[in-house]
Amino acid sequence: MAGAKKTSRSVASVESLRVCLIHTPCADLDDDHLEAPLGLLYLASSARQAGHEVVVVDLTGTKAETFSQRVPTGWDVYGLSTYSVNFGLTAALAAQIKLSSPRSVIVAGGPHASALPDDVLRAGFDHVISGEGESAFVELLRRIASGVNDNARIITGQPVAHLDDLPPPAYELVDVESYTRVVEGKRCLSVLTSRGCPFKCTFCNSTIMGAGQPLRFRSAGNVVAELQDLRRIYGISHFRFQDDIFAFNIRRIRELTRHLKPLQITYRCFSRVNTCSAEMARLLKDGGCVHVSFGVESGSPKILAQNAMNKGQTPEQIVWALENAHEAGLRTRIFLIVGFPGETDQTIEETLKVVKSAPWDEFSVYPLIAYPGTPIHDEPGKFGITHVDRTYSKYLQVGRGRTAGFTIRTAGFDEDKVCRWRDYVIQELQGNGRQWAGESKKFR
């Protein structure tokens, strides 16, 4: 893009760039302002550590007609995080920035850009960073500031090997008190203690940012230091550990719990059903955990199987984990997916039978969404998918009023059938002390 070349020359003599990082909203959600954009805050910290001036503009909770009042003009670099469901809005905002600030460099990152870098580049961005962005973004800023232009428009970010080396996320760049995420009804902040996931579920896009990379952990001391700083600065003692799988490695949870217990914090986290032993559940509770979420997805062996979801868990493990969490006194939330290829009325009943036999408190039910970068999106025929909606604007797991996006078809079902399955599962599970997750007042 000619604009990128022009900008590089215009800031060639500048060592410190002015960088604006933008988080775009999703108006189809009941609340898209739950929590600060943690990925952008990490990016901001790394860019500031490299000597650049950085602002973070979180547009969630606002309407498109107000963007021009919120986004400053004339900054050297704009970085926009991309998600599939609202990518059209993000691309439109990038075009507006290019008109108002034609000499600026516009960079895309995040899951949608990582999965479809060529498509995102064609949408009008100067550069796309695929994968974990801290080191790649800092290097791009260095090259822009020095006037180097080698036409490397798609940049693959290298996963951070030693997470303790990262500066903490720059929460001071956003209005912490404006966010609505709560744990036990108390305002909370999200903390990331690890990156990566060792599992290869065919529907999950969490591995896109660090595809093929091992699970990496921050040290217990590093995590505790961040928690102490957040409590000292913001007066917050409630946290949401945002790791894809926080309760994964029992040895690590033993060590973390020894450090967390004296802090007397309250937290919620995510686990897997094949790792939540009775000891794991007790350790979580002992360290301050009050709420744990599980990706149950299905109770059908056929759907969970290696040649389908590749979930790496069994119906028996689902019941085992939920019983362990319940016995430890943890509030539990389960996530279910309906409409995976091969789904039938029988597999739906198998799922209901399993989850009805186990103790849990809250639930959500999603239709299968073929997120870019996942096998079911990139190789749909392999799974018997005959149609994938590639407009992406419907890629919504749970929206306003429990709405959702129904985006695939197979020879055995269409979007309407998946919708009926979802409605049926919700109807069968709600009540008797079990609550739709979106209606929880204490855990959002």
Image (cartoon, rainbow, N blue to C red):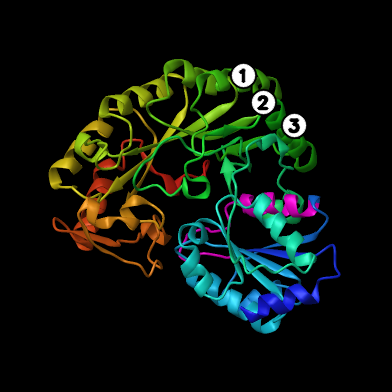
- The one of 231 and 114 positioned closer to us in this rendering: 114
Query: Taking 131 as reference, is 312 above or below it?
Result: above
Q: Is residue 13 left or right of residue 201?
A: right
Answer few, some or many: residues within 10 Å of disc 2's Cα (few below 14, many 20 plus, some between 14 and 19). some
Identify the amino acid type marked 2. Answer: Ala
3 or 1: tag closer to the N-terminus: 3
Which numbered dot is residue 310?
none
Q: Amino acid at mark 1?
A: Glu
Residue 310, visible in the rendered structure: yes
Which residue is disc 3 drawn over? 225
Q: Tell me which label, 2 or 3, sits earlier in the chain.
A: 2
Q: CA distance from mark 2 to mark 3?
A: 9 Å
Q: Quadrant of residue 74?
A: bottom right
As drawn, which residue projects farthest toward the front? 150
The reply to whether the C-beta atoms of the residues labelled 3 and 1 are less than 8 Å apart is no
Tag 1 residue: 255
Residue 173 in the image, given as x and y percentages of width and height? 75, 55
Asked whether residue 443 is drawn in magenta, I would say no
Q: Position of residue 330 (x, y in %)?
A: 47, 26
Front-lying residue, 141 or 234 = 141
* Residue ID for mark 2: 220
Marks 1 and 2, Cα distance to the nearest angstrom?
7 Å
Magenta region: which residues? 23-48
Q: Are marks 1 and 2 in contact (CB under 8 Å)?
A: yes
Q: Is residue 379 above or below residue 144?
A: above
Identify the residue at image location x=72%, y=65%. Answer: 20
Question: Which amino acid lies under the numbered mark 3 shown in the image of this protein?
Answer: Ala
Task: Please tell me in which quadrant of the rendered image residue 142 appears.
Answer: bottom right
